[in-house]
Image (cartoon, rainbow, N blue to C red):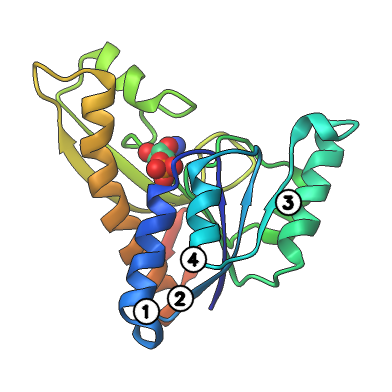
Amino acid sequence: ARIVVLVSGSGTNLQALLDAIAADPDGYGARVVAVGADRDGIAGLERAGRAGLPTFVCRVQDHASRGAWDQALAEATAAYEPDLVVSAGFMKIVGKEFLARFGGRLVNTHPALLPSFPGAHGVRDALAYGVKVTGCTVHLVDEGVDTGPIIAQGVVEIRDEDDESALHERIKEVERTLLVDVVGRMARNGYRIEGRKVRIP
Ligand code: GRF
């Protein structure tokens, strides 16, 4: 399977995918064909460059409207003919055009146990609420914010001494393993979407 990965930041989830593929290129069942971003100058793009992968940057401010940005992102992604698109720390909500092309094939990872704490501050919001366990969710993207069908979740316990960054680091450890596992299984085995259930045989 061909994968395009979308990033906005440090790209450690991207790196985990690249490492898993490099460790077993045939066995993993997928390869990253390009990395896209919504901004320049991020470590995620450097990681892609070091791996010799093509990159593209699609910035909202370079387009006349959000819709035009969405269309440009969809076209840039489509140029690499991906079977799956992985949003790995991509901090933008994609729009209609992107979903029209990649709906059902767009996988996101979120640093909380959805449907609790959706949105851009899942770690901070869980801490502020005072829950005792949180984690990460790998899910398909639909038109809502972190509302699409859940594929897999990982649990992380919150410690009394946690601050946002310490907790986020522990979540990200679980998240990387989960994402690598889920994407590989989807690529190797295929999957079916039945209502809100995603079944990977
Ligand atoms: C992940 O925790 C992701 O869920 C969140 O941002 C983080 C991205 O980390 N939205 P990285 O860029 O993959 O290191």
Q: Are marks 4 and 1 in contact (CB under 8 Å)?
A: no
Q: Which residue bears the numbered disc 3?
A: 98
Q: Earlier in the sequence, mark 2 or mark 3?
A: 3
Three-letter amino acid code at the position of disc 3:
Phe
- Residue placed furthest toward the left: 160
Residue 187 disc label: 2
Image quadrant containing the C terminus? bottom left
Q: Secondary structure at mark 1?
A: helix
Question: Marks 3/4: CA distance?
Answer: 26 Å
Question: Marks 3/1: CA distance?
Answer: 26 Å
Q: Secondary structure at mark 2?
A: helix
Q: Are marks 4 and 2 in contact (CB under 8 Å)?
A: no
Q: Earlier in the sequence, mark 4 or mark 1?
A: 1
Q: Is mark 2 within 8 Å of ligand 1?
A: no
Q: Earlier in the sequence, mark 3 or mark 4?
A: 4
Q: Tell me where residue 188 sits by quadrant.
A: bottom left
Camera sees residue 200: no
Question: Marks 2/1: CA distance?
Answer: 8 Å
Q: Is residue 167 left or right of residue 47?
A: left
Q: Secondary structure at mark 4?
A: loop
- Residue placed furthest toward the bottom: 26
Q: Position of residue 174 (x, y in %)?
A: 23, 48
Q: Does residue 37 sit above or below 118 in this rendering?
A: below
Residue 51 disc label: 4
Question: Marks 2/3: CA distance?
Answer: 20 Å
Q: Are marks 2 and 1 in contact (CB under 8 Å)?
A: yes
Q: Residues within 10 Å of mark 2 (few under 14, many from 20)?
A: some
Report the image quarter containing ligand 1.
top left
Closest to the observer: 148 or 40? 40
Q: Position of residue 3 (x, y in %)?
A: 55, 68
Front label number (4 vs 2): 4
Q: Which residue bears the numbered disc 1?
A: 28
